[in-house]
Image: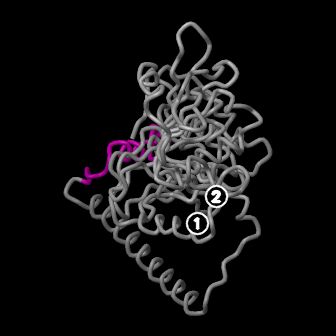
Amino acid sequence: MIFPKIYKEVLNLINKIPEDIHLEYKSGMAIDFSKVVEMSKDVSAFANSDGGVLIYGVQEDKLTHLPVSIDGVDSKKYSHEWLENVIKSNITPIIPDLEIKPIKIKGSNLVIYSIFVPKSYRAPHQAKDKKYYKRYNFKSEAMENYEIDDIRSRLQTIPSLVNISAKVESMMAFLIIENIGEYIAKEVAFELSDDLKNWAVKQEAKVFSTGVKYFPPQQKYKFRYGFINSIFHEGSQIPSQFEIAVSYQHPLYQNRIQDTFGIDLQSYFGSSVDKSDASIQGEKIEQSIKELTEQVKKLNSILTEISNISGASGLALSIPTLKNFKNMLENKNFEKLSPIYQSHSFFMEILGVNMELAYHISDHFRQSDKSEGLKQIEGINDKTIENIKQFFILDSDGNEPT
């Protein structure tokens, strides 16, 4: 398939290579703010057919369909970014692996836009006018219903692999990425909005920036997104409605697959799930087994600790534990602990705070023992800060929290 990327390659087409089912020339006048519908028709028609190349900025002979001259497109008025946005925002779903190559015309602000449109296995793609088009007789024509159904069968042969969803557990929202297919998804990449990028950086969810080279079947990534009441709190910096675009290489498809997932946490308000009697009884039995298992684990843990104490030396306990036993017997101060990388349950136990506040404190001390900013933690009070000063080592130079 011809896909010129430099000016010389375009010149070699003039008066030599006519239009065909995979190639179409458009004059520079065909790119205009008022012609967005026509542009979406032409691009989607190639994707719905067998793929092809659109070249904007080249005039053709209407009888021979040969390119006869170059008129170019004003790049200042119609930039590469503008053209890319027009195509992405006016064709549904987005066409994966579409490539736009701007070719400069020396000595001017004019360019030629060479656009490669692959045959899409995510077809049919809808143009801005809500219709579906195909490539036929050197132009874009609306498709019949049977043709649309036939194109949809492409999608059945290429099952999706990567799925992104949200889940709420005990008032905590989670983002889940999983491979739901039977094949390895390769070179998985994500595209986030700016506010979601900020969340990913703060939560150290690096997979959203680095991607996944090999994503095997049934593998799952689960990220703590935030507490529901915090997400919907007025002034929250965490979006409750957003989209995540994902693209990857499918082993059954030569081009990249691209999907966009919409997440709407607002839908969880006032929702409930109806369950059958059998399901409810099954959950009760499962919960009872879990409770018995936890009790056995706790008992075993207690017996293990007692056995350490009652050993030959009793020194199997940690040094901080022994020191604090000694301090308690001598009415001395508690041996301070490091807060770095401690879990939320650790802070719940030491400080006696609820789970949400414990999560926030754990996030605060995730990377360092910094004391500044404690008062900015949501839900914290002066008493809790005093307890933190009493039980934990804060800063190597002994600064107190502010």
104 w.r.t. 207: above or below: above
Residue at mark 1: 148
Q: Secondary structure at mark 1?
A: helix
Tell whether position 354 is magenta: no
In the rendered structure, the answer to whether residue 123 lies left or right of residue 170 reads left
Colour scheme of this structure image?
A: one colour
Circles 1 and 2: CB atoms closer than 8 Å: yes
Which residue extends farthest left? 312
In the rendered structure, the answer to whether residue 35 lies left or right of residue 93 reads right
Image quadrant of residue 355?
bottom right
275 w.r.t. 244: above or below: below
Q: Secondary structure at mark 2?
A: loop
Which span of residues is magenta-colored? 314-341
Looking at the image, tell me whether mark 1 or mark 2 is earlier in sequence order. Answer: 2
Residue at mark 2: 132
Report, in whole angstroms, how far the alpha carbon at label 1 lies from the one at label 2: 8 Å
Q: Residue at x 61, y 64 (%)?
A: 170
Where in the figure is residue 375, as x and y percent of width and height? 69, 34
Question: Hey, what amino acid is under mark 1?
Answer: Ile
Which residue extends farthest bottom? 277
Tell whether position 321 is magenta: yes
355 w.r.t. 97: above or below: below
Which residue extends farthest front? 63
